[in-house]
Image: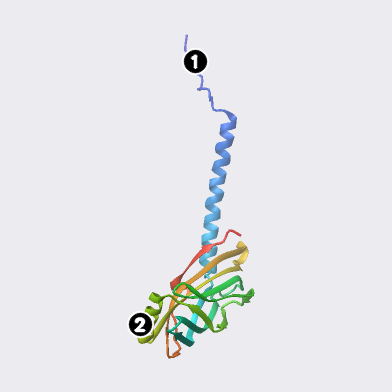
Amino acid sequence: MQRQNFPPHDHTHPLFKCVVLIASLLAILVIIAGIVVCIGYKTMKPKVPEIIVARAELDAVDFNHSNLLLTIKVSLVMTAENANLKSRVSFYDTSFSLNFNGHRIAKWAIEPFGINANSSVIVNYISQPTTIHLNAVEGEDLDRSMELNMISVDLKGNSKTRWRLGQFGPIKFGVHLNCQLLLPVDSTTIFSNCSSRVALRFVILSR
């Protein structure tokens, strides 16, 4: 008698098949979404907004050697730039601080503002005269700096930005400023290279 062969029985659980099918579909969707995002990025060419220190000046500096009191006043001209050709950018939660050798000279915040596509906004700041008390070592360091006609101050700043990238929805970035400004004692204006492009890092905001 001829032996009859039967096809092997598939023992795979239907639930497992369903899970595999769903996982495959999700992988395909992720790949498609990635392709769409890449095409959109190349088409829109989004650019991260920047904060740039255009000019800085030491308006006044006076050091009293008897009681080691330093009085200092600084003025800044900064620009916020939006290089995106089709999107308006909003800046919010913007704040800055000026410090000398770890001593706070000034701290200020800016109200939320917007910048049209491919435009910039000038942000001027003039600090009030601030008096800080130095220790003996800091006083000696300051004397040497003044002999060199140069005082170093640290500028730090933070801002959040938001704009819309076509049909992909809103994009949010945080920009962080951390620069050292070398200011001439004779009140000469310097044109700083301090900007988000060279001295700040940016991170995607989660909210």
Q: Residue 107, how many percent across, how many down?
A: 56, 75
Amino acid type of the residue that numbered disc 2 sits on in the rendered structure: Arg
Dot 2 falls on a residue whose secondary structure is: helix
Residue sitting nearer the eye, 22 or 159: 159
Asked whether 40 or 181 is in front, the reply is 181
Return the x and y of residue 114 as percentages of the image width and height.
63, 75
Could you tell whether 174 is left or right of 138 in the image?
A: right
According to the picture, the residue beneath numbered tag 1 turns out to be 4
Q: Which mark is residue 201?
A: none
At 51% from the left and 63% from the top, the residue drawn is 203
- Local packing at callout 2 (Cα closer than 10 Å; few below 14, some 14-19, many 20+) is few
113 sits to left or right of 178: right
- Crowd around label 1: few <14 · some 14–19 · many ≥20 (10 Å): few
Where's residue 60, x and y in %?
Answer: 49, 88
In this image, 141 relative to 117: left or right? left
Residue 194 image offset from top left, x and y in percent: 45, 77
Above or below for 26 versus 80 = above
Mark 2 = which residue? 144
Q: Residue at x 55, y 41 (%)?
A: 23
User: Closer to the N terminus: mark 2 or mark 1?
Assistant: 1
- What amino acid is at disc 1? Gln
Instruction: Give the image quarter of residue 90.
Output: bottom right
Front-most of 185 and 170? 185
Residue found 51% across the figure and 19% down from its top: 6
